[in-house]
Amino acid sequence: MNRWQKYDRIFTGILAGVVIPLVVMTGFYLWKSDGMSAGEFFDRLVISGALTNALSVSVFANVFAFLLFNRLDILRASRGILGTTIVWAILVFIIKFS
């Protein structure tokens, strides 16, 4: 058993699949906010129609985690990331087409 096997749980993948896009979106906010509050920033994203683009880029970061988990042979966690990414993608489509 290698040292990564203790992380081979679906919950680990789900947690990573939720946290990684939030961290990327927070980084995007810190990079582009220009002193705005978080609410103002997201209102600006919605008004400009860029919210779905920002969410898509944030969720895309899950691909790297998915590939890393596959490389480390922790496949249950990979399933958790994949499932969470699908849920994020559905959320992006709902926001885009509503």
Image: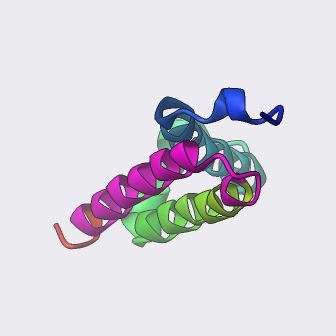
* View extreme (right): residue: 3
Residue 13 sits inside the magenta stretch:
no
Magenta span covers which residues?
69-94
Residue at 67% in and 55% down:
65
Q: Could you say where residue 71 lies in the image, as x and y percent from the top left?
A: 75, 60
Q: Nearer the viewer, residue 94 or 4?
A: 4
Q: Is residue 6 above or below residue 10?
A: above
Magenta stretch, main secondary structure, is: helix
* View extreme (top): residue: 6
Determine whether, in the image, residue 87 is placed left or right of residue 2.
Answer: left
Residue at 61% in and 36% down:
8
Q: Nearer the viewer, residue 74 or 58?
A: 74
Residue 90 sits inside the magenta stretch:
yes
Q: Which quarter of the rendered picture does the N terminus lie within?
A: top right
Q: Quadrant of residue 19 in the image?
A: top right
Determine whether, in the image, residue 86 is placed left or right of residue 31.
Answer: left
Residue at 69% in and 52% down:
73
Residue at 33% in and 54% down:
87
Q: Could you say where residue 41 lies in the image, as x and y percent from the top left?
A: 54, 49
Q: Nearer the viewer, residue 79 or 20?
A: 79
Q: Could you say where residue 32 lies in the image, as x and y percent from the top left?
A: 71, 57
